[in-house]
Amino acid sequence: MAFEYAPAPESRDVVDIKPSYGLFINGEFAEGSGTPFKTINPASEEKLAEIATATSDDVDRAVQAARKAFGVWSALPGSERAKYIFRIARIIQERARELAVLESLDNGKPIRESRDVDVPLVAAHFFYYAGWADKLEHAGFGRRTTDGHSGAKPLGVAGQVIPWNFPLLMLAWKIAPALACGNTVVLKPAETTPLTALLFAEICQQADLPPGVVNIVTGAGETGAAVVAHPDVNKVAFTGSTEVGRIIARTVAGTDKKLTLELGGKAANIVFEDAAVDQAVEGIVNGIFFNQGHVCCAGSRLLVQESVQDELLAALKRRLGTLRLGDPLDKNTDIGAINSAEQLAKIREMSEIGDSEGAERWSPPCDLPEKGFWFPPTVFTGVAQSHRIAREEIFGPVLSVLTFRTPAEAVEKANNTPYGLSAGVWTEKGSRILWMADRLRAGVVWANTFNKFDPTSPFGGYKESGYGREGGLAGLEAYLDV
Ligand code: NAP
Ligand code: MG
């Protein structure tokens, strides 16, 4: 970890952060009835803004606005809805720099990631789903009826609750398909990262989106619970922890609400002895240290074939020694801040459990800034399948290394998890990739790459990683009555 070279950081002046923000209901910013909270920059602990808290009454106003707007929005021809969604996509591109800086300030992620990965993907999702809005009857979800309407109907008001790890991208995954299908939305961002959702609300105003089509309600878990429980919400979409996912599934059970859940993961990144070592090392680094490991599909379990373990780990450690940890707005930063004090405490606790269970901890020499929440890139070797660091999601820059001898053993170990969101396979043999992909119980299997996202690919999990798919054609189905 080197700090000797300090290029000019991306300027935070490109974004105008207001001292306080209200709720976005019916196309306007309105006061919340609850006690406001502050959002901070996790890299400095500096307060960024005061944010309104929506009570259940405020959530009710937002749902009513969305219900009223549903009449207007769902009646528009798909080609007209598409124009609005395309306009939103273009404004996102125009304001990309502002969005990226704000995301990095509020979340702690490196500007290189928010600028080069998150925001371009956000725009891509809006472009992709805008393209479907007038083609739903061709998407295979029902024939055109005699009165000329598509057979597939929107569900109504979608209540959407998202986490803090990809605040704007998760918003795009939820809002773009919902709007394309003719639904209206009430979305609750995570308490620690509300700012880009509120800037998105301004973008909706700028795009002249009809009032009430998108509503943003800020607050803590209680606000999310009020959205999920509201009787006039027809569809609930949630991304976050398995624990809260279970609570939401219980709330929705017995109602006619449709539900999609995108929960945690403990993905295996599997490296065979014939893999190109340098490429595999890049894939391992990207798999677990991208976004400080705050990634549900992170490659948090490295399964390496025993015969190449020493060579691979030596190369990995050399590479980790070159990563730069520090100011998220610095264009050369690889590892930013941990999103919150709570998450940092959780990562520390899980790492201490790794120590006490007998795994061996390694980090490159690394000076952590004094202020803010930081954790060095960390590798645990000598990890057994029974260890908690091999079974539970850490959601931080911590890699657990296990070994295998045969492909069958790799499959068995990879699938030995309550989760099933993603997996990676590194090998030169195409036949082995297909053999593995057939046997891995994971929603996404990457081959010789990792953490690659595209709006055309469905994403989602098996088992405790949740159900339903987001992205691609499957992502439309989640917002249609088929
Ligand atoms: P979380 O509690 O599940 O939060 C996700 C979202 O749900 C947030 O907007 C949260 O609001 C809201 N929420 C909390 N309680 C709720 C309830 N009872 N009803 C409805 N909504 C509710 O996740 P977290 O506490 O931020 O993170 C905890 C762990 O979850 C992480 O360590 C990680 O393992 C996992 N996680 C997974 C993903 C993923 O992408 N699959 C993302 C984030 C976290 P507040 O923000 O105000 O709490
Ligand atoms: Mg924040």
Image: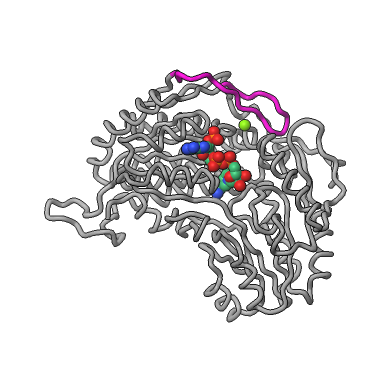
User: In the image as oriented, which residue stretches furthest toward the left?
Assistant: 146
Count of picture labels:
0
Picture coordinates of residue 240 (x, y %)?
53, 45
Q: Residue at x 32, y 47 (%)?
A: 181
Magenta range is 31-50
Q: Residue at x 56, y 70 (%)?
A: 440
Q: Is residue 151 left or right of residue 117?
A: left
Picture coordinates of residue 47 (x, y %)?
66, 23
Q: Which quarter of the rendering shows the C terminus?
A: bottom left
Q: Is residue 341 above or below residue 474?
A: above
Picture coordinates of residue 298 (x, y %)?
63, 55
Q: Is residue 412 above or below residue 6?
A: below
Q: Is residue 249 left or right of residue 378?
A: left
Q: Is residue 385 left or right of residue 469?
A: right
Does residue 167 appear anywhere in the picture?
Answer: no
Q: Residue at x 81, y 65 (%)?
A: 313
Q: Could you tell me what secondary structure mostly forms the magenta stretch?
A: loop
